[in-house]
Amino acid sequence: MSFAQVSKEPPNITKYIEQLATDDLTKHQTLRRRVFLLFHRPSDSYLGLAILSCTIVVIFASVVSLCLSTLPSLRKKSIWDSMELAFITYFSIEFLLRLWSSPSISQMFQQFLTVVDLVVIGPFWIEFFLKLSGGIKCQKDSEDGCQSSYGGLTVGLRMLRLLRVFRIIRVGRYSSGLQNVILALKMSLPILWIIFVYMIMLVCFFGYFIFLAERGNWNSEIQKWEIVVDSVTQPSSFQNAFDGIWFVVTSMTTVGYGDKFPLTGLGKALTSALIVVGVLGIAFPTSAVGAAYIQIHATTEQDETQEEVKTEVVGHRPELWELCKEYTEMRTIALEVSDLISQYDPIVRVFDDGQQSK
């Protein structure tokens, strides 16, 4: 799916868009309607597509500049501050326009991506205005050489700088594919939670038994477990159960750092079983999320097709669309009646058989 395609809006947003298209609006309301549609239906106009493309370019450019500014040879360049100011100014204007044109500000702040916008924008302006007021003084030759007159605020601002990388998440606002992945994860949460608990149990189980198999004998002089390999005594790689858990996690996820590995036959047998279980443990959640995504993707495609048909019909034959809605309502009622008949059909048959026997 392209970035211009957005997933199905919430019912309140869809209702609001329909009202904007039919109600008599003032100039101010008409302007709000146009701004709202530019951000929520970008594919309906060339200007909306242009704004969408520009926003995506700015997001990726800001992330690239953020990464480039960490290079030792480029870190001291003053251009990064100017670029950061330009990027955040663009994001701030976009956020304020969304806020101004939103039908419900309270519902807007309940959305996850709105929180991401605040996380991306807020820390920058806090630091910016504190520098202007003289509350923070930074050395030009050092990124972290800032001193604050507000106590531990400098440390807090350093932590807030880390949140700048979250701006890449904003791309999810413009991609229906990414939004469908999030919905698939939400739908799969019950089965994912069960698998997570199951994996935690396996990690603890295998981790402890790997430790028992590989610890060897305790040396009270050096206060360590030692194991004998090829007649050579050496400290064991598994000094406690947490070393075993770390080894289990890296093995189950097929990472295998190589910092720890079994040396005994029992340890190798446990590790072989562990790797097989790990592959299965990864396959189960992947298939669950994949099935949910396919279902959501099919529903989204169907909704988009219906929306295209609706737009085409309303544009040429509005009265035909009203007939289609009435037909849909009648068909829904017919299906409900059919379900009721199928539920009570066995009872009716028993009653008819009783009447005939009499």
Image (cartoon, rainbow, N blue to C red):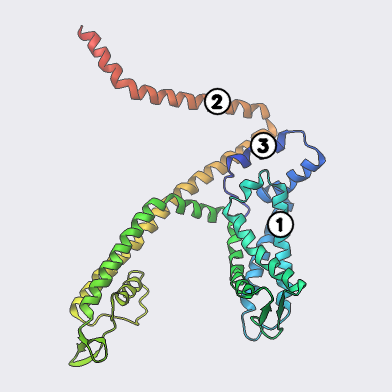
Q: Position of residue 235 (x, y in %)?
A: 26, 88
For marks 1 and 2, the one nearer the N-term is 1
Task: Tell me if residue 174 can be seen.
Answer: no
**Amino acid type, callout 1:** Glu
Q: Looking at this view, is 43 or 86 the one in front?
A: 86
**Amino acid type, callout 2:** Tyr
Is residue 225 toward the left or the right of residue 313 in the image? Answer: left
Q: Where is residue 166 in the image (x, y as percent from the top left)?
A: 58, 65
For marks 3 and 2, the one nearer the N-term is 3
Against 247, residue 183 (above or below) is above
- Disc 2 packing (10 Å; few <14; some 14–19; many ≥20): few
Q: What kind of element bears circle 2?
A: helix
Q: The N terminus appears in which quarter of the rendering?
A: bottom right
- Disc 1 packing (10 Å; few <14; some 14–19; many ≥20): some
Measure how far apart labels 3 and 2 are at the Cα level. 20 Å
Give the residue number, with chain letter if any, for mark 2.
Answer: 327
Against 40, residue 259 (above or below) is below
State the residue lying farthest toward the right. Answer: 27
Against 300, residue 214 (above or below) is below
Q: Do the residues labelled 1 and 2 touch (CB within 8 Å)?
A: no
Of marks 3 and 2, the one in the foreground: 3
Residue 18: numbered disc: 3
Residue at screen point 72% across, 83% down:
140
Give the residue number, with chain letter if any, for mark 1.
Answer: 94
Q: In which quarter of the image is residue 130?
A: bottom right
